[in-house]
Amino acid sequence: MEAALGLKGEAIRMEKVRHVPIEGKSSQGCPIAKWIIRRSSDDEKVLFVVKHRAGHVCEHAWMVISIVVWEGVKSDIADKCYDIMSKSWPTTDFR
């Protein structure tokens, strides 16, 4: 990834998805996030969320399931969006 993106060291981070046997639930029984991934520092430019493919030991055993480019949205705007979503989504009916 360093060669492909032209970034080095702490500019690239990879986080492994962890299997959770029990889904997180709110007091109303709705699913909730177990983890929130935040940018580690301003040096971090790209985050790859990866998953290990069960039973694979080949060079393709890891799969990228999400790519986050932190510079896509300014941090103050991203914080405001997160606040709005975290307050409005739990009460929104998406049917």
Image: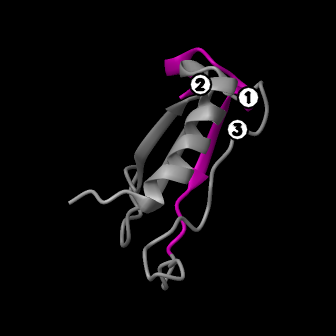
Please name the residue shown 51% across and 46% down the image: 85
Q: Position of residue 49 (x, y in %)?
A: 51, 48
Q: What is the CA distance from the residue labelled 2 to the residue labelled 3?
A: 18 Å
Q: Position of residue 54 (x, y in %)?
A: 38, 71
Q: Vertically, is 22 above or below 54?
A: below
Judge whether residue 83 is colored magenta: no
> In the rendered structure, which disc, 1 or 3, sits on the residue that comes first in sequence?
1
Asked which secondary structure carries label 2, the reply is helix
Quarter of the view holding residue 30 = bottom left
Q: Which mark is residue 79?
A: none
Q: Amino acid at mark 2?
A: Glu
Please name the residue shown 27% across and 56% down the image: 94
Q: Which mark is residue 9?
A: 1
Q: Vertically, is 9 above or below 27?
A: above
For disc 3, the marked residue is 39
Magenta region? 1-19
Q: Which mark is residue 2?
A: 2
Identify which residue, 55 or 87, lies in the foreground. Answer: 87
Quarter of the view holding residue 95 = bottom left
Nearer the camera: disc 1 or disc 3: 3
Colour treatment of the image: one colour
